[in-house]
Image (spheres, rainbow, N blue to C red):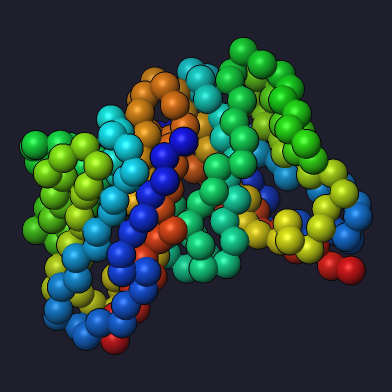
Amino acid sequence: GEDVEQSLFLSVREGDSSVINCTYTDSSSTYLYWYKQEPGAGLQLLTYIFSNMDMKQDQRLTVLLNKKDKHLSLRIADTQTGDSAIYFCAEKGGSYIPTFGRGTSLIVHP
Amino acid sequence: SAVISQKPSRDICQRGTSLTIQCQVDSQVTMMFWYRQQPGQSLTLIATANQGSEATYESGFVIDKFPISRPNLTFSTLTVSNMSPEDSSIYLCAAGGPNVEQFFGPGTRLTVL
Protein backbone atom coordinates (compact mmCIF):
# COMPACT_ATOMS: atom_id res chain seq x y z
CA GLY A 1 0.00 0.00 0.00
CA GLU A 2 0.91 3.64 -0.05
CA ASP A 3 3.24 4.96 2.61
CA VAL A 4 3.86 8.25 4.38
CA GLU A 5 7.05 8.71 6.39
CA GLN A 6 7.96 11.31 8.98
CA SER A 7 10.68 11.66 11.55
CA LEU A 8 9.32 10.99 15.03
CA PHE A 9 10.78 13.89 17.00
CA LEU A 10 11.90 17.48 16.53
CA SER A 11 13.19 19.76 19.25
CA VAL A 12 13.55 23.52 18.74
CA ARG A 13 14.13 26.60 20.82
CA GLU A 14 11.34 29.11 21.26
CA GLY A 15 11.55 31.80 18.60
CA ASP A 16 13.38 29.63 16.09
CA SER A 17 11.81 28.17 12.95
CA SER A 18 10.69 24.55 12.91
CA VAL A 19 10.73 22.45 9.76
CA ILE A 20 8.88 19.15 9.76
CA ASN A 21 9.49 16.89 6.79
CA CYS A 22 7.39 14.20 5.19
CA THR A 23 7.82 11.85 2.25
CA TYR A 24 5.14 9.85 0.51
CA THR A 25 4.98 7.22 -2.18
CA ASP A 26 1.61 7.70 -3.90
CA SER A 27 2.31 9.35 -7.25
CA SER A 28 -1.40 10.04 -7.72
CA SER A 29 -1.69 12.15 -4.55
CA THR A 30 -4.05 15.03 -5.09
CA TYR A 31 -4.20 16.61 -1.64
CA LEU A 32 -1.53 16.80 1.03
CA TYR A 33 -2.38 17.78 4.58
CA TRP A 34 -0.83 18.81 7.84
CA TYR A 35 -2.73 18.08 11.03
CA LYS A 36 -1.87 19.09 14.59
CA GLN A 37 -2.73 17.00 17.64
CA GLU A 38 -2.35 18.52 21.07
CA PRO A 39 -2.25 16.26 24.14
CA GLY A 40 -5.61 14.66 24.84
CA ALA A 41 -7.24 16.18 21.77
CA GLY A 42 -8.30 15.09 18.30
CA LEU A 43 -6.62 16.12 15.07
CA GLN A 44 -6.92 19.71 13.93
CA LEU A 45 -6.43 20.45 10.25
CA LEU A 46 -3.70 23.08 10.00
CA THR A 47 -3.37 23.47 6.28
CA TYR A 48 -3.44 21.58 3.03
CA ILE A 49 -1.99 21.96 -0.43
CA PHE A 50 -3.11 20.74 -3.81
CA SER A 51 -0.62 18.65 -5.72
CA ASN A 52 -0.42 21.24 -8.53
CA MET A 53 0.98 23.83 -6.10
CA ASP A 54 4.53 24.02 -4.80
CA MET A 55 4.05 26.43 -1.93
CA LYS A 56 1.34 27.71 0.35
CA GLN A 57 1.76 30.29 3.09
CA ASP A 58 -0.66 30.96 5.91
CA GLN A 59 0.57 33.35 8.59
CA ARG A 60 3.42 31.57 10.40
CA LEU A 61 2.97 28.37 8.40
CA THR A 62 4.66 27.65 5.08
CA VAL A 63 4.06 24.41 3.21
CA LEU A 64 6.51 23.38 0.50
CA LEU A 65 5.80 20.56 -1.91
CA ASN A 66 8.37 18.90 -4.16
CA LYS A 67 6.17 16.65 -6.22
CA LYS A 68 9.07 15.16 -8.18
CA ASP A 69 10.71 13.93 -4.98
CA LYS A 70 7.37 13.33 -3.22
CA HIS A 71 8.54 15.51 -0.34
CA LEU A 72 6.36 17.78 1.77
CA SER A 73 7.49 20.12 4.52
CA LEU A 74 5.86 22.34 7.09
CA ARG A 75 7.75 25.36 8.34
CA ILE A 76 6.58 27.13 11.46
CA ALA A 77 8.13 30.55 11.87
CA ASP A 78 8.82 32.02 15.33
CA THR A 79 7.91 28.75 17.06
CA GLN A 80 6.12 29.17 20.39
CA THR A 81 5.58 26.81 23.29
CA GLY A 82 1.95 26.54 22.22
CA ASP A 83 3.14 24.92 19.01
CA SER A 84 4.30 21.87 20.97
CA ALA A 85 2.19 19.01 19.64
CA ILE A 86 2.27 16.05 17.29
CA TYR A 87 2.12 16.99 13.61
CA PHE A 88 0.72 14.49 11.13
CA CYS A 89 1.36 14.55 7.42
CA ALA A 90 -1.31 12.94 5.25
CA GLU A 91 -1.94 12.45 1.55
CA LYS A 92 -5.04 11.62 -0.42
CA GLY A 93 -5.02 10.31 -3.96
CA GLY A 94 -7.58 8.39 -5.89
CA SER A 95 -9.49 7.08 -2.89
CA TYR A 96 -11.56 9.08 -0.45
CA ILE A 97 -9.35 8.08 2.43
CA PRO A 98 -6.12 9.84 3.38
CA THR A 99 -3.00 7.95 4.41
CA PHE A 100 -1.36 9.31 7.55
CA GLY A 101 2.23 9.33 8.70
CA ARG A 102 3.13 8.30 12.25
CA GLY A 103 3.39 11.91 13.38
CA THR A 104 6.28 14.13 14.43
CA SER A 105 6.41 15.23 18.06
CA LEU A 106 7.50 18.87 18.14
CA ILE A 107 9.03 19.93 21.43
CA VAL A 108 9.59 23.64 21.95
CA HIS A 109 11.88 24.62 24.79
CA PRO A 110 12.70 28.05 26.16
CA SER B 1 -15.51 23.17 7.71
CA ALA B 2 -17.44 20.67 9.81
CA VAL B 3 -17.57 20.58 13.60
CA ILE B 4 -17.61 17.09 15.02
CA SER B 5 -18.46 16.09 18.56
CA GLN B 6 -17.99 12.71 20.20
CA LYS B 7 -19.19 11.19 23.40
CA PRO B 8 -18.08 9.96 25.74
CA SER B 9 -14.78 11.82 25.73
CA ARG B 10 -13.23 9.08 27.85
CA ASP B 11 -14.24 5.92 29.66
CA ILE B 12 -12.77 3.17 31.76
CA CYS B 13 -14.37 -0.19 31.13
CA GLN B 14 -14.14 -3.73 32.39
CA ARG B 15 -12.94 -6.59 30.26
CA GLY B 16 -15.73 -8.36 28.42
CA THR B 17 -18.11 -5.39 28.31
CA SER B 18 -19.04 -3.23 25.31
CA LEU B 19 -18.94 0.52 24.77
CA THR B 20 -20.80 2.57 22.16
CA ILE B 21 -19.23 5.82 21.02
CA GLN B 22 -21.38 8.46 19.38
CA CYS B 23 -20.30 10.93 16.71
CA GLN B 24 -22.33 13.96 15.66
CA VAL B 25 -21.47 16.30 12.77
CA ASP B 26 -22.95 19.76 12.57
CA SER B 27 -23.63 19.52 8.83
CA GLN B 28 -24.46 16.85 6.30
CA VAL B 29 -21.33 15.09 5.09
CA THR B 30 -20.73 12.56 2.39
CA MET B 31 -18.53 10.22 4.35
CA MET B 32 -17.86 9.38 7.98
CA PHE B 33 -14.98 7.31 9.26
CA TRP B 34 -13.79 5.66 12.44
CA TYR B 35 -10.11 5.52 13.33
CA ARG B 36 -8.12 4.00 16.15
CA GLN B 37 -4.99 5.63 17.52
CA GLN B 38 -2.99 3.41 19.84
CA PRO B 39 -0.48 5.01 22.20
CA GLY B 40 2.43 6.52 20.28
CA GLN B 41 1.05 5.33 16.96
CA SER B 42 -0.50 6.88 13.91
CA LEU B 43 -4.11 6.58 12.93
CA THR B 44 -5.48 3.27 11.74
CA LEU B 45 -8.71 3.33 9.79
CA ILE B 46 -11.26 0.89 11.22
CA ALA B 47 -14.10 1.43 8.76
CA THR B 48 -16.07 3.82 6.60
CA ALA B 49 -19.58 4.34 7.94
CA ASN B 50 -22.10 4.22 5.10
CA GLN B 51 -25.48 5.83 5.44
CA GLY B 52 -28.24 3.28 5.23
CA SER B 53 -26.00 0.29 4.60
CA GLU B 54 -23.33 -1.81 6.26
CA ALA B 55 -20.00 -0.17 7.03
CA THR B 56 -16.94 -0.94 4.92
CA TYR B 57 -14.27 -2.46 7.15
CA GLU B 58 -10.53 -2.34 6.66
CA SER B 59 -8.36 -5.41 6.82
CA GLY B 60 -8.05 -6.68 10.38
CA PHE B 61 -11.36 -5.23 11.58
CA VAL B 62 -14.66 -7.08 11.62
CA ILE B 63 -18.27 -6.15 12.16
CA ASP B 64 -18.76 -8.48 15.11
CA LYS B 65 -16.05 -6.69 17.07
CA PHE B 66 -16.75 -3.14 15.85
CA PRO B 67 -20.39 -2.79 14.80
CA ILE B 68 -21.09 0.61 13.26
CA SER B 69 -24.31 2.43 12.56
CA ARG B 70 -25.02 5.47 10.44
CA PRO B 71 -28.74 6.18 10.41
CA ASN B 72 -28.42 9.58 8.72
CA LEU B 73 -25.89 11.96 7.17
CA THR B 74 -24.84 13.61 10.42
CA PHE B 75 -24.63 10.81 13.01
CA SER B 76 -22.74 7.57 13.50
CA THR B 77 -21.93 5.16 16.32
CA LEU B 78 -19.07 2.74 16.84
CA THR B 79 -19.37 -0.08 19.36
CA VAL B 80 -16.30 -1.78 20.75
CA SER B 81 -17.57 -5.23 21.73
CA ASN B 82 -16.31 -7.77 24.23
CA MET B 83 -13.45 -5.50 25.17
CA SER B 84 -9.98 -6.57 26.23
CA PRO B 85 -7.04 -4.44 27.43
CA GLU B 86 -5.68 -4.49 23.86
CA ASP B 87 -8.65 -2.33 22.85
CA SER B 88 -7.38 0.51 25.02
CA SER B 89 -6.89 3.32 22.58
CA ILE B 90 -8.20 6.62 21.32
CA TYR B 91 -11.11 6.24 18.91
CA LEU B 92 -11.58 9.09 16.48
CA CYS B 93 -14.53 9.92 14.30
CA ALA B 94 -13.85 11.82 11.08
CA ALA B 95 -15.96 13.25 8.29
CA GLY B 96 -15.20 14.38 4.78
CA GLY B 97 -15.67 13.68 1.12
CA PRO B 98 -13.75 12.90 -2.03
CA ASN B 99 -12.68 16.44 -2.80
CA VAL B 100 -12.39 18.09 0.58
CA GLU B 101 -10.28 17.77 3.65
CA GLN B 102 -11.13 15.35 6.42
CA PHE B 103 -12.19 16.76 9.79
CA PHE B 104 -11.79 14.96 13.07
CA GLY B 105 -13.70 14.79 16.30
CA PRO B 106 -11.91 15.25 19.64
CA GLY B 107 -11.63 11.51 20.19
CA THR B 108 -12.75 9.05 22.84
CA ARG B 109 -10.03 7.79 25.15
CA LEU B 110 -10.86 4.22 26.15
CA THR B 111 -9.10 2.29 28.90
CA VAL B 112 -9.99 -1.36 29.39
CA LEU B 113 -9.05 -2.98 32.68
Q: Is residue B72 above or below residue B34?
A: above
Q: Is residue B49 above or below residue A86?
A: above
The residue under the point 58% across, 20% down is A50
- Residue drawn at (75%, 29%), measured in percent from left and top? A57
The reply, left or right, for residue B49 in relation to residue A47 is left
Tell me where residue A12 sits by quadrant: bottom right
Q: Residue, x 65% and y 59% (percent of image)?
A: A85
Could you tell me residue B21's position as x and y percent?
24, 63
**Residue B25 sits in quarter:** top left
Query: Residue B52: x percent and y percent?
Result: 9, 36
Q: Nearer the viewer, residue B21 or A26?
A: B21
Residue B55 appears anywhere in the view: no
Q: Residue furthest top?
A: A52
Q: Is residue A59 visible?
A: yes
Q: Residue B73's x, y, as percent?
A: 21, 37
Nearer to the camera, A37 or A27? A37
Image side of residue A44 versus residue B26, left or right: right
